[in-house]
Image (cartoon, rainbow, N blue to C red):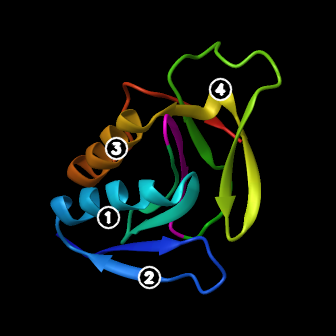
Amino acid sequence: MNQIKVISSYINQEEVKISREEELLAILHDLLQYGNSVILLKFPHLGVLTIGIGTPYGFVEYGDENGLPPFLCATDEPNFGIGDSFVEFDSGGTPTPIPIHYCLPFDRVLDIVVYFLRNKKLPDYITWKKV
């Protein structure tokens, strides 16, 4: 497996390289202790997953390897999210509101990350919306 770069959203953008699924899952679980935060997962030749780490919710956004739009956000239900609710995630020290309709249970976020890692594509059991 190629090395995955896990990059924090903080100003110093601390970077960890990982080559095993178990390592990735351990880091993601460890990050839960810091509250809701944003990290980047760079997959060589596949793209970047921007993920929200948090409980009970996180989020997943996909961008291509060059960071160019369109970006795709995962949502569990195609018609979910009518309303103005948000969940805040810390991105580099800045509170960043994410619409609730793009938030997923943290276990679902992990499922998406693992699926992407194993299959080298976005899962089709989730609805992806352009943002």
Magenta span contains residue 62: yes
Q: Distance between the residues labelled 1 and 2?
A: 12 Å
Residue situated furthest right in the rendering: 84
Earlier in the chain: of badge 3 and badge 2, it is: 2
- Secondary structure, mark 4, is helix
Earlier in the chain: of badge 1 and badge 2, it is: 2
Residue 124 vs 87, above or below: the answer is: above
Q: How far apart are marks 4 and 1 (CA)?
A: 25 Å
Which mark is on residue 101? 4
Write down the residue under mark 1. Answer: 27
Which mark is on residue 5? none
- Residue 82: percent from left, percent from top: 76, 15
Q: Distance between the residues labelled 3 and 4?
A: 17 Å
Q: Residues within 10 Å of mark 1 (few under 14, many from 20)?
A: few
Residue 77 vs 62, above or below: the answer is: above
Write down the residue under mark 2. Answer: 15
Residue situated furthest bottom in the rendering: 12
Q: Which residue is drawn at 77% across and 26% down?
A: 85
